Amino acid sequence: MLVTYLEASRDLCDTDSILFGAALAVCRIIGAKLSTAGRATGQSSAIPAWRIRIEERIAKARALIGRLICFRSGNTRPRIVRTVRMAFAGTNVSLSQPDIMQKLTERIDDLKLRIAAWGKRIRRYTERSTRFNQNRLFQSDQKRLYKSLERSIVSGTGPAPNQADMVAFWRSLWSEPVNHNEGPWTEVVASQCA
């Protein structure tokens, strides 16, 4: 059965996938434990573990902010109330207190500040890592560095528009008569500027 699949494979990547699938099937049949080290599922990414943890913290904090805002706007479903209670766990804040809305606002602001600090930490690392890699590339291969910088500048832009198309576009915009809402405030501003 494996021969038919191997004959149909077009390149080394297909052959690798077929052999890995066959080995995986055999291991499952005989009940053997297998290690996925070196495969796409088990490879370690280039993103550091601490950054992944911070991004997870940011995602959880954003979800909590969303639920706190839902509660503040009057949503008292049990799941939302349970989340709000967990957000204030360990403090002397009760949901029946008269100043709960102020406490909610303070907690939301605190979470937003934490998210900003975590994001800044990731941004600082990214900038530092980029600078470090560019410095190292500059010392070893300046030509490749400049090519990569040019590529990053060009990649954000698309193909340049044709000059005739641009002229036609702006002419069509400028030639159309437009009725603006001339409110009384425009007269006040005009008199102050005169």
Image (tube, rainbow, N blue to C red):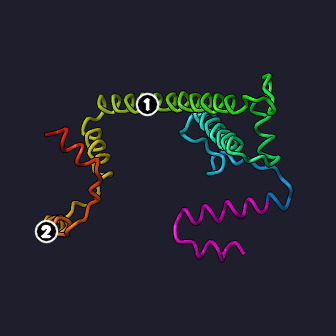
Q: Earlier in the sequence, mark 1 or mark 2?
A: 1
Q: Is residue 18 magenta?
A: yes
Q: Residue at x 66, y 46 (%)?
A: 42
Residue 191 vs 161, above or below: the answer is above
Quick check: is 77 in the magenta stretch?
Answer: no
- Return the residue found at the far right: 31
Of residues 99 and 76, the one nearer the viewer is 99
Exactly how many numbered labels are in the figure? Answer: 2
Residue topped by disc 1: 129
What residue is disc 2 on? 164
What amino acid does circle 1 point to?
Answer: Ser
Determine the residue positioned at 63% across, 46% down.
Answer: 38
Name the one closer to the observer, 8 or 103.
Answer: 103
- Looking at the image, which is closer to me, 66 or 33? 66
> Which percent across, then down, holds residue 115?
57, 32
At label 1, counting other C-alpha atoms closer than 10 Å, the crowd grade (few under 14, some 14-19, many 20 or more) is: few
